[in-house]
Image: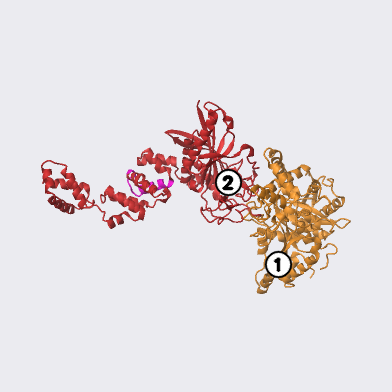
Chain colours: A orange, B red
């Protein structure tokens, strides 16, 4: 069985048609994980025994002729900031190293309800703060295409395990690009849905008004299939979509982009963009034209002010969200303390990493009395302006296309000491979170060195169907999804 | 030189909802520590709050009952501070857009009526409780109370004496109880008051530093604490040490009978309020407000007027009866069941209140049923028992909960009204007391009293006294 390149669709059909069993899939996958994982470091926790148990249940269901879920027997890797009942959920932080949630996140419940099999928890930047996965408290993740390079972040583990054939599906979370940027760096498909389309219940919050859970897969079709399972209203999440805006994304996936109006922001090509990326994006745009789309330049300035607004809002919310980790109830607690203040201070000083502390300080400052109007309030006003700007564009256009990242995957350690340089890498992705829009990153080519290049397709609110149709059409043209990093083809 | 006291009140009231504000845990008081908790109210990572709509409804109701304007668009905010009783390290509250603004409560102190303005009412969640044990190096935390819904009612600084402040709290309490917004039990902490007090010279326009007093858990403590603080500040101003009145928060120590400084303005928290991103803004329809308005029961101010007009009670009687929701309902219940209004009031304000006090029972724990009291009053009216016997029967009803007829029958307390029976007894008594009969005939009219006493003694007090007296006098004159 060629487990490495198998898609979700192939696995579920194969199991249904009894070409192979769920147990065979899980066993083959763990065999591969044992071989590849030491080099990649994509997982924090593996659940081999549990996964096998789940596989046995699925196989028995098939034998008994029972109704099967949409993802029966499909192995799923879950980012380690998404709670899993009975499986430790660490956020790649010393703070939650031993935290075992007594509940499943809503997305995990939904996956289980469709008979998917949880195989492990993926590595990430601590509390989802970072763009290189070097902020994990436990180990860094390597890019499967070049292990000297970073896989991107913060869902670096989730992207790397899919790219390296260690899971056909993983869940990530995206606050400013944390699904799309690693998807681009690792050459996989990653979708950040419209804010509210997927429940956040059980996602350990970084920035509540920006966070969204989404799938990372090898193909666009797998992405569509996964989104069908993940989406929908959740009474446990007050910000989740109220009306029925959910759709079937597989229906009409092949319809193509004929007649689509696609906007390309003027000037994004000059914005310190890597030349090879620019070329790949231009080639893809040409493909879309050939497929019958109408492509036009649009006025959509991408500025540093937006980056500032993003870092102020996300850090402000983070400073509040992460305040509960005080050593009183669960998680890490300092060993030696005399008084309450000391307990809290030492616990937080010892268990949070540098980047997390930097953002907590930044956010606390931005919310402080006397600074609130100058920072947080101003950032919120800009955010509203950005939202309106996008809404206006989507009155006329079906999609906006940009690169996902301005640069190719960089070397491990290259930007660790320059947070500003690291933050600038988010320039194409953060606005989408500020505007609460859906966006997908997919591979659109490779650099001369063989590094993947990502293209970003952005849609209006709840138009994931349009994005997926366009992505599917491009994928059919480029046929990149079956390529697996060199040296990782064989089990 | 005259001073005047300026007081503004901040009152926290627990709302009478079945479940907590952001999760489905029960809100009942007195459960085992941490029995009423779940991942959501414990703020475990990844959990999210979902607003209980009943909280919004009750807050609107409170606003309407206190003559406030309802803000059709309002929102929740986070108030950030570290303390172990606050599991998320922020309290979800309302900052710049509260659910209700502006309002009026009328109070009356020593015959003078006064309107007190309400600045705002906002929704928030309660915190847990720390338990500090003597001689133990650590404290325990009970999170049962965490997430119990509260409203905070903030008055303007319109109160001019501790007495006015207490009256304001009393009026507010009775309105909230009547409207079914809160049970307002100060001893259980479901109504908690903080007072902001300052003093200034009469005629001075500006306000001096105010001091916030916390931890006053009964009306008695409330008045004591405020008077003590008033005195402390007056003394400082009188003796030229006014600069020592600094803006600070002081805790009332009821044991020591004084306030103790908790924190000054300098070390006040910066709460870093910002809009709660996990909850969408609260948008209220005018239809909802209208339907809540229609459900609003008669509130004390209106009820007082009606009681006076319909039942012809005195102001004092009305004040007591309407002052407590349970007592007022009990009274009106008996009247509706046919009790004569004045008589029912006399019994409730007399014997019932006395017994409740003796047995240390609250007005919400009246052990006598309304029907039973009405039956008792009917027994008196129909002459079946005397007023004196009725007192005895009522006490028995209060203790055993038995019906008045059953008690009268069981104890043989029924009034003897049969003429034959009484006549026979009178004849016996007259025969046994020839001397007294003689005395009467010789003009000693007081002999009747003695003979009457004998008749009552022979009937164990059950003879209808009116009837017996008439028959006795008739017999003597024969």
Give me the disc on residue A51: 1
Residue A347 sits inside the magenta stretch: no
Q: How many marks?
A: 2
**Vertical placement of A402 versus A72: above or below?**
above
Magenta residue span: B325-342
Per the image, label 1 sits on a secondary structure element best described as: helix
Q: Which of B189 and B381 is in front in this view?
A: B189
Per the image, label 2 sits on a secondary structure element best described as: strand
Place residue B411 in its image quadrant: bottom left
Q: Nearer the viewer, residue B294 or B21?
A: B21
Q: Are marks 1 and 2 in contact (CB under 8 Å)?
A: no
Residue marked by disc 2: B124
Give me the disc on residue B5: none
Give the side of residue A190 with respect to residue B302, left or right: right
Residue B326 sits inside the magenta stretch: yes
Place residue A258 in its image quadrant: bottom right
Q: Nearer the viewer, residue A47 or B215?
A: B215
Q: Which of A227 and A291 is in front in this view?
A: A227
Picture coordinates of residue B60 (x, y %)? Answer: 53, 44
Picture coordinates of residue B395 (x, y %)? Answer: 33, 51
């Amino acid at each position: 069985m060629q487990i490495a390149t198998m898609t979700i669709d192939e696995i579920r059909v194969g199991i249904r048609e009894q070409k192979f069993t769920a147990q065979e899939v899980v066993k083959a996958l763990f065999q591969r994980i044992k071989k590849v994982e030491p080099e990649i470091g994509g997982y924090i926790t593996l659940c081999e025994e549990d996964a096998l148990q789940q596989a046995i249940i699925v196989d028995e269901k098939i034998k008994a002729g029972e109704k099967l879920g949409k993802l029966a027997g499909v192995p799923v890797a879950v980012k380690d900031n998404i709670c899993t009942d009975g499986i430790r959920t660490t956020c790649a932080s010393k703070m939650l190293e031993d935290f075992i949630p007594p509940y499943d996140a809503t997305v995990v419940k939904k996956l289980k309800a469709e008979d998917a099999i949880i195989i492990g928890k993926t590595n990430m930047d601590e509390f989802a703060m970072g763009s290189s996965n070097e902020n994990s408290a436990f180990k860094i993740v390597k890019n499967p295409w070049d292990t000297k390079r970073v896989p991107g972040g913060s869902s670096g583990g989730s992207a790397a395990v899919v790219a390296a054939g260690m899971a056909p599906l993983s869940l990530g979370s995206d606050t400013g690009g944390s699904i799309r940027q690693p998807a681009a760096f690792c050459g996989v498909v990653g979708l950040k849905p419209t804010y509210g389309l997927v429940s956040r219940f059980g996602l350990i919050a970084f920035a509540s008004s920006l966070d969204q859970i989404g799938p990372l897969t090898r193909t666009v079709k797998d992405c569509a299939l996964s989104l069908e399972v993940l989406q929908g209203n959740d009474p446990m999440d007050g910000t989740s979509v109220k009306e029925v805006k959910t759709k079937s994304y597989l229906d009409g996936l092949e319809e193509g982009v004929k007649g689509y109006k696609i906007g390309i922001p003027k000037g994004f090509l000059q914005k310190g963009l890597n030349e090879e990326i620019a070329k790949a994006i231009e080639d893809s745009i040409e493909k879309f034209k050939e497929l019958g789309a109408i492509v036009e330049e649009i006025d959509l300035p991408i500025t540093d002010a937006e980056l500032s607004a993003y870092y102020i809002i996300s850090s402000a919310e983070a400073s509040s969200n992460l305040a509960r980790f005080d050593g009183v109830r669960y998680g890490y607690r300092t060993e030696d303390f005399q008084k309450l203040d000391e307990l809290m201070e030492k616990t937080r000083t010892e268990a949070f990493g540098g980047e997390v502390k930097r953002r907590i300080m930044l956010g606390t400052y931005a919310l402080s009395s006397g600074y609130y109007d100058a920072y947080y309030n101003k950032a919120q006003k800009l955010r509203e302006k950005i939202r309106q700007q996008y809404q206006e564009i989507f009155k006329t256009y079906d999609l906006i296309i940009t690169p996902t990242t301005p640069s190719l995957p960089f070397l491990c350690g290259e930007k660790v000491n320059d947070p500003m340089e690291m933050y600038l890498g988010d320039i194409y992705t953060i606005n989408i979170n500020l505007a609460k829009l859906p966006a997908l990153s997919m591979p659109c080519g490779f650099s001369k060195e063989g590094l993947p290049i990502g293209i970003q397709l952005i849609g209006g609110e709840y138009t994931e169907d349009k994005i997926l149709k366009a992505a599917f059409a491009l994928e059919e043209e480029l046929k990149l999804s079956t390529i697996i990093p060199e040296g990782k083809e064989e089990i | 030189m005259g001073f005047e006291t300026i007081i503004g009140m901040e009152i926290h009231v627990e709302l009478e909802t079945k479940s907590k504000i952001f999760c489905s845990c029960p809100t009942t008081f007195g459960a085992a520590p941490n029995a009423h908790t779940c991942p959501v109210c414990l703020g475990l990572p990844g959990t999210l709050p979902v607003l209980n709509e009943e909280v919004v409804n009750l807050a609107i109701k409170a606003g309407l009952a206190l003559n406030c304007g309802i803000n059709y668009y309002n929102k929740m905010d986070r108030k950030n501070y570290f303390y172990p009783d606050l599991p998320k390290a922020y309290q979800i509250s309302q900052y710049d857009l509260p659910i209700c603004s502006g309002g009026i409560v009328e109070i009356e102190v020593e015959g003078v009526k006064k309107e007190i303005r309400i600045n705002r009412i906002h929704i928030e969640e309660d915190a847990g409780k720390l338990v500090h044990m003597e001689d133990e190096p650590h404290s325990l935390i009970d999170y049962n109370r965490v997430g119990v819904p509260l409203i905070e009612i903030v008055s303007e600084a319109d109160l001019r004496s501790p007495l006015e402040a207490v009256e304001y709290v009393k009026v507010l309490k009775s309105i909230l109880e009547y409207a079914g917004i809160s049970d307002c039990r100060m001893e259980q902490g479901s109504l908690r008051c903080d007072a902001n007090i300052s003093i200034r010279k009469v005629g001075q326009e500006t306000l001096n530093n105010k001091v916030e007093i916390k931890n006053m858990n009964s009306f008695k403590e409330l008045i004591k604490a405020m008077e003590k603080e008033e005195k402390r500040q007056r003394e400082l101003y009188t003796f030229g040490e006014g600069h020592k009145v600094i803006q600070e928060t002081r805790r009332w120590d009821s044991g020591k009978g004084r306030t103790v400084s908790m924190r000054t303005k300098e070390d006040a928290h910066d709460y870093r309020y910002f809009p709660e991103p996990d909850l969408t803004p609260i948008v209220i329809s005018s239809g909802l407000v209208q339907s809540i308005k229609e459900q609003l029961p008669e509130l004390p101010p209106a009820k007082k007027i009606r009681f006076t007009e319909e039942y012809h009670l005195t102001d004092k009687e009305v004040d007591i009866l309407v002052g407590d929701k349970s007592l007022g309902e009990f009274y009106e219940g008996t009247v509706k069941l046919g009790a004569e209004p004045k008589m029912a009031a006399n019994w409730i304000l007399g014997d019932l209140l006395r017994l409740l006090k003796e047995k240390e029972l609250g007005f919400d724990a009246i052990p006598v049923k309304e029907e039973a009291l009405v039956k008792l009053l009917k027994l008196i009216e129909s002459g079946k028992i005397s007023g004196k016997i009725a007192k005895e029967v009522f006490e028995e009803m209060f203790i055993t909960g038995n019906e008045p007829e059953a008690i009268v029958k069981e104890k043989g307390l029924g009034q003897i009204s049969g003429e034959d029976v009484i006549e026979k007894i009178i004849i016996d008594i007259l025969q046994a007391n020839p001397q007294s009969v003689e005395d009467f005939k010789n003009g000693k009219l007081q002999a009747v009293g003695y003979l009457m006493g004998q008749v009552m003694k022979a009937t164990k007090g059950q003879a209808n006294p009116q009837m017996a007296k008439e028959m006795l006098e008739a017999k003597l004159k024969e």
